[in-house]
Image (tube, coloured by chain):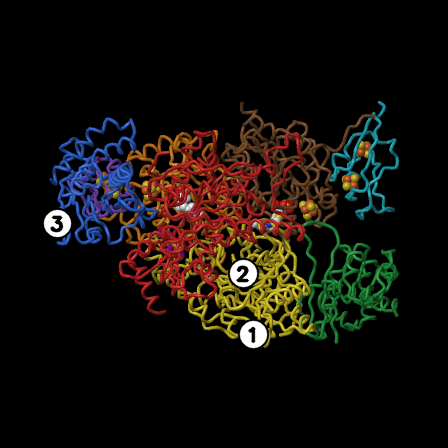
Chain colours: A green, B blue, C orange, D brown, E yellow, F red, G purple, H cyan
Amino acid sequence: MLNEKVVCAGFGGQGVMSMGKLLTYAGMIEDKQVSWLPSYGPEMRGGTANCAVMVSDTLIGSPIIEKDATTVIAMNLPSLIKFEEELVPGGKLFINSSLIERKAQRDDIEVYYVPANEIAVSLGTGKAANMVMLGAYLEVTKTVKSETVIEAFKKVFGPTKAHLVPLNENALLKGAEAVK
Amino acid sequence: MLNEKVVCAGFGGQGVMSMGKLLTYAGMIEDKQVSWLPSYGPEMRGGTANCAVMVSDTLIGSPIIEKDATTVIAMNLPSLIKFEEELVPGGKLFINSSLIERKAQRDDIEVYYVPANEIAVSLGTGKAANMVMLGAYLEVTKTVKSETVIEAFKKVFGPTKAHLVPLNENALLKGAEAVK
Amino acid sequence: MAVVFNKTQGLTEKEFHYCPGCTHGIIHRITAEVLEELGVLGDAIGVAPVGCSVLAYDYFNCDMNEAAHGRAPAVATGIKRALPDKVVFTYQGDGDLASIGAAEVVHAAHRGEKITTIFVNNAIYGMTGGQMAPTTLVGQKATTAPYGRDESLCGQPLKVSEMLATINGAAFVERVAVDTPANIRKAKKAIKKAFECQLEGKGYAIVEVLSTCPTNWGMTPVDAISWLQENMMPYYPMGNLRNPWEVE
Amino acid sequence: MAVVFNKTQGLTEKEFHYCPGCTHGIIHRITAEVLEELGVLGDAIGVAPVGCSVLAYDYFNCDMNEAAHGRAPAVATGIKRALPDKVVFTYQGDGDLASIGAAEVVHAAHRGEKITTIFVNNAIYGMTGGQMAPTTLVGQKATTAPYGRDESLCGQPLKVSEMLATINGAAFVERVAVDTPANIRKAKKAIKKAFECQLEGKGYAIVEVLSTCPTNWGMTPVDAISWLQENMMPYYPMGNLRNPWEVE
Amino acid sequence: MAKVLMKGNEAVGAAAIKAGCKYFFGYPITPQNEVPEYMSKELPKIGGSFVQAESEVAAINMVYGAAGAGVRVMTSSSSPGIALKQEGISYIAGAELPCVIVNMMRGGPGLGSIQSSQSDYFQATRGGGNGDYRTLVYAPANVQELVDYTMKAFDMADYYRNPVLVLGDGMIGQMMEPIEFKETEKMDLPEKDWATTGTKGARKPNIVNSLRLQAPELEALNQKIEAKYMEMEEKEVIYESYKLEDAEIVFVAYGTVSRITKNAIDLLEQEGIKAGLIRPITLWPFPNKAFAEIPATAKALMSVEMSQGGQMIDDVKIANEGRLPIGFYGRSGGMVPAPQAIVEAAKELLGGVK
Amino acid sequence: MAKVLMKGNEAVGAAAIKAGCKYFFGYPITPQNEVPEYMSKELPKIGGSFVQAESEVAAINMVYGAAGAGVRVMTSSSSPGIALKQEGISYIAGAELPCVIVNMMRGGPGLGSIQSSQSDYFQATRGGGNGDYRTLVYAPANVQELVDYTMKAFDMADYYRNPVLVLGDGMIGQMMEPIEFKETEKMDLPEKDWATTGTKGARKPNIVNSLRLQAPELEALNQKIEAKYMEMEEKEVIYESYKLEDAEIVFVAYGTVSRITKNAIDLLEQEGIKAGLIRPITLWPFPNKAFAEIPATAKALMSVEMSQGGQMIDDVKIANEGRLPIGFYGRSGGMVPAPQAIVEAAKELLGGVK
Amino acid sequence: MAKAKGKVTFDEARCKGCGLCVTVCPVGIIKLDTSRINVKGYHPATVDEMDKCIGCANCATMCPDVIISVERE
Amino acid sequence: MAKAKGKVTFDEARCKGCGLCVTVCPVGIIKLDTSRINVKGYHPATVDEMDKCIGCANCATMCPDVIISVERE
Ligand SMILES: Cc1ncc(C[n+]2csc(CCOP(=O)(O)OP(=O)(O)O)c2C)c(N)n1
Ligand SMILES: Cc1ncc(C[n+]2csc(CCOP(=O)(O)OP(=O)(O)O)c2C)c(N)n1
Ligand code: SF4
Ligand code: SF4
Ligand code: SF4
Ligand code: SF4
Ligand code: SF4
Ligand code: SF4
Ligand SMILES: [Mg+2]
Ligand SMILES: [Mg+2]
């Protein structure tokens, strides 16, 4: 039974919020129970951003992740440091190895190193690193289909961003390949 | 045992508030329990004014008079109409007959008609009508001594009004005579 | 004989509760006459303040709201935004408008809210018993300025019209007085323009009316008028400060 | 080599939390330098607003109070009345001072309260994420003015200094900008005068500082400076509007 | 209608518009800024009006004006901003005007923090304004409920001519969940013939007012509005119970905390401890009657709140009438209770009463 | 000292000055105008400062400033004005500043009336501001107590670094009674080394502040102030009981209404019905422990208030813990309960439970 | 030039005896009647020599209680 | 006229790379060092040709984070 509790975390600007939103949206399209909760920091500028995404077959209780993340996607070092310990034993940790040199500390979890920025740059823009990570995540967990994520992308961003669909499809694919 | 509940009522400007205050102050000087409560009307102008004075040998509960006045001093007609019914059976009603032509309606009370304005004018100023009424009241009820009222007057109004002391003494006296 | 003066339909039959000689009554009348003459009584929605004129809702013969102290311009904004075709006005005292309601009047002007304000400056808090207002003159006694307003502690009186005239959204700003029949007629003209300003959608309009409070000034009504002329009028000069038509 | 520029003792060691290129930092520095240069750091009591500069209490190296949103002038009044010999200042943004706190600043000026205000006008609500301020320019986009500020609905931006300059208790009023080193030096001079005005007991003093918010304007810090010069400075002219010494 | 994924704050705005609200007066404050932002974008499209007021005080008084003019109107804010609206809310209740007020609570007291909290329960249910008035208070636990109760709030406000509060917190305002705008039944609502819309010369002037200079008249007004409150207590109570049958411990929790508490209940179940939940959905009127359903197996109650020391616990005590011991677990200042911590607190309480 | 006859409102001012208060910030509102008027006359004489603020909001924030500067400071108002001060009071509690706030209650809601009322009980005891804070609330029943508790309020405020409320009503503010300024013992109070008085270069800057951007820090602040509230609950409860021994019916009433209730008790006695009174003098902390003194003879409790439907009755219910039936008698909007009416209500209640 | 002829009517019961009308009458014909007290308790304004009235309406313009009507030939 | 000789020092760890100092240096010697990222995550400002510095303190005056010190001969 699906009960994914995913933390997406990184610098502001790395697209972690929209990565989470797309996953949530796709979950909704596939008729799963979903929620998305951003950390809205103190009324201050800068720093890191993260969101907690739930995708589940059953009703979602608390939308908060507290030491019970099934997956953590860490796009930068501070995020890795902060969230590795939030994983349940057996949880999955996706590390953006393009920006994070450190290795995971725990040995009771599954760790995937994805050079997301490098892959994205190879596709033409470093901005797609978040989609690369999402592709890797989906390949491992099968939480939703990657086609559904693309469908969600179209719904969320509309026709003005339609030209980016192929790029994003590619990014999801390459991300998936990176963990195959 | 003394338990006076006095309503002093009249037009604004007739000195009903200070009549009440002097009685209250005198009661205090004579070591009785006292309270003074003004009606503070709605935040509007004009109309009648009244205050409720308690002078008692025992602790005062409610400072409000509600159908249990032992005395009503009515300086004008609206006050008479409004407060006659507040008297307990056997209560005392002092009517300023200079301004009020009507007679008391109840026969279970003691009524005193005092031409206060006329007496005051005869003393030199209509403004002393309130002291005339107070004199009459004290003569009947002996609630406090009239000397104490004069003492209170000196304390409340201070040296700047010292020249008015003889006038007020006279007014109290004439008021007392009017009901002897 | 032809009737040359009769009570306007803009007022109800209720007797004013104001003290003898209080100029609130004059200002009510001329405002009501303007509403009648402009034919907008059926479209008018007034906002009464908290102050001696709190019961204005009983006197104006049109729909009325009673606002919280100082908030009449905000209440009027709510009404006007909901019903942009209606004629919305506030009637406010100097405590209400210049003290607690300073932010609301500044921002109604700032937004260029299409409403009209009749601002009764009697240099005192009438209703609550003569406390100092921002408009109380230096040296003038008040129950909270028992030694007279002290400039070194309380500053000089606030000139509301001059202040609001710096704001572009305040399309019409004029100060008038109701000390003589001639000035009352001028005041009425200003009030009429202030409503026309609204009807033409030009922006916020305010008429400051120098007024008396015989009771709390401790004077007869007649002396109060003289005091107004001798003390208030020199400090608060009459005249138009903003006018949307001149600009065009 | 002689040190010609070093961090002032008027600031603590805490790093500013402001966004890159945010001019709040510049204004903090020059204010702190003035306090140091006047030798009043030990007597100074500052009041921080609610806004991006809410943490100003961590940065100024003197006693500090954090006021409720918009109420800094009232808080400062309380402090100054209790301790008339101290040097009391408020540091406020345009949402804080010109919007919710309009009544408080008008009345601090009206009373001639002997305090000094540093008013940071960045034409936006920085802290809460770029909502419209009373000072937002016509056409400028904000999160609550997604189609750009519409004059017909929101009026023209409020010129706070011009408004306050009509009030006699406002002894010193000047508008400056921090767009260039030269203007920053001028701004510092104005701030110094504003404190001298307090020290000499002349009355209320305020310096309006035209400032940037690169983050919510959606620009680089460098572009934000240009936008300030090209858009804000023409609408908000720099200059002194009141000066207690000229009058003498 | 299809489901859409929406942030709580935006969903509030969308629900209001759906319910016919075309007027919004507000002032920015985290964590509810998306409400005014959404309204500023959407209301112009439908010929409505969004005004960013100069302050919360002005905003609530604009609401008073618009409500008096007979339109559906809303404002929203967060804790300190709602504190500033108290006089205005009291006026709205006194003048018997309908409106909807949203509070996305944050940590207090004072400026506090911007994180989720439930420490405005007293303010919401007792009123921080002056006088004997009440507001109907809905406490949704998810974004769908936020939508549903926001819409319902407009009907209730119009029906009772009374302000209705939607009490959320930063979390529900910020989170996204799928929602559906259900077509609800149209309530039969009285005409607003009391509204000040201009007499058009066709009727006597209407007056919107809370002043009653004569005490007997004010008492009459109070009796009239009390009658409405009694009707609300009778008819408007809403609550949910969860796993109440044979519970040993019964939690009482509302809003987002109730979700966390459900997680805790499930954890307790795994440990073989039977726990249930009473979730008030209307905080006022409080679901006293729900406490009659508590099974004989229950040994204790526990109020779980995002509050230091508890506020709803007062109502729990009143509803409980001395029957069961009452425990409390809470976090404050923006801290959110963890399910496991609730579990521990429950075990400790049960240990104490066993 | 000799007795003097003073109006309640003026006595408050005199007591404050006696207690060392030299700073007052207020705004006119009936029925408490004599407080600011008195202060405007007296404070200049002693080198203090009276400021008529532009509003109640400004007044409470001036109080915040002056309290932060370490001086004894007071403000006073009446119901709607106190509603406007709620945000400020929450800030003062959050920043842990001492001050005294007087509310001479009048009828509500909204503009209401200017006559006596007790319908701000909730506002006073639960706080209409945001967040988990409390204020110590004294409810004097006569002018002497008004004096005594106003003076005590300053000590308590300084001791706990928390706002203290003196809750009167129009009646007590307007009435005159003889009073005495007793020489009270000087309390041992901590130095105000936290005050912002200028560092003089001799210490680190002090900061007066209620913001805690990080939730854990705000929770810590909440825990700290909760500890003070627990200490107050422990140490500061004050109440009076009257003819409680073998009472059949026990009234609960505070402030001026308690006096009227005493009259009613005496009337009942004349009719052979034994009645007693619990009079909370601190409304918060509420004297729960007084209810332990209720004799076994008691058949019912009755809350008597100047409120529509009752507010203190919630605390009576909590204190009662379901033991006795609870009745209510109240008048609202400025109407004052008559002793005889209380007698009738009591007889009816007793009839029902006998 | 023959002066216009006017006539004023007071709603006497509502007069508050403020005297403002008295001060503005150009021909000085309005007095407060100190010999009488109206239902409100005030000495009401009154005109003896109505034929001197020029119907200028100054009195009505000034009356705060709007109790004066004016007619003119 | 020989130009004054100056020297600037950056508290580099606190630099936010805003670039404001870059725009105001009259001799154009300040750059953001895009090859490095400081602990805060920004490209810090830096000067290569310090000998061209005239010690005018424009950069320090403009720096919002008060991280520049200037010396002059
Ligand atoms: C919030 C609030 N504060 C104070 C008051 C008390 N109050 C009633 S009227 C008034 C002042 C009125 O003065 P002004 O606006 O000048 O009107 P005037 O009576 O002089 O016409 C005040 C302070 C109130 N009702 N509500
Ligand atoms: C009573 C209240 N209302 C609203 C807020 C939310 N708030 C915090 S800062 C701010 C605006 C700040 O803008 P500004 O004063 O321009 O300062 P800046 O951030 O631009 O420097 C607002 C509305 C609050 N904290 N308290
Ligand atoms: S108190 Fe003053 S303003 Fe009020 S009605 Fe009387 S005269 Fe007029
Ligand atoms: S949001 Fe704007 S004002 Fe606030 S710190 Fe960032 S740039 Fe400065
Ligand atoms: S109308 Fe003119 S002349 Fe006639 S009474 Fe009135 S003021 Fe006098
Ligand atoms: S002005 Fe009017 S109210 Fe005053 S005395 Fe003349 S008629 Fe009477
Ligand atoms: S001191 Fe002047 S010359 Fe030297 S680096 Fe700074 S701006 Fe350039
Ligand atoms: S101005 Fe200061 S913070 Fe900005 S780049 Fe230059 S040194 Fe760095
Ligand atoms: Mg006035
Ligand atoms: Mg700003």
Identified by mark 1, the residue type is Glu
- Examine the rendering and report whether any part of residue C190 can be seen: no
Identified by mark 2, the residue type is Gly
**Measuring 51% from the left and 56% from the top, which residue is drawn there?**
E123
x%, y% of residue E63?
49, 57
Determine the CA span between mark 2 and mark 3. 67 Å
Q: Where is mark 1, residue-wise?
A: E183
Label 1: few (<14), some (14–19) or many (≥20) C-alpha neighbours in 10 Å: few
State the SS at label 3.
Answer: loop
Determine the CA span between mark 1 and mark 2. 22 Å
State the SS at label 2.
Answer: loop
x%, y% of residue E90?
45, 56
Q: In terms of depth relative to the viewer, which is nearer, A129 or E140?
A: E140
Which region of the structure is painted magenta?
C36-46
Label 3: few (<14), some (14–19) or many (≥20) C-alpha neighbours in 10 Å: few
State the SS at label 1.
Answer: loop
Disc nearest the viewer among 1 and 2: 1
Disc 2 CB within 8 Å of nearest ligand 2 atom: no
Residue E101's label in the rendered image is: none
Disc nearest the viewer among 2 and 3: 3
Q: In terms of depth relative to the viewer, which is nearer, D40 or D52?
A: D40
Residue E48's label in the rendered image is: 2
**Relative to residue F341, is residue C6 depicted above or below?**
above
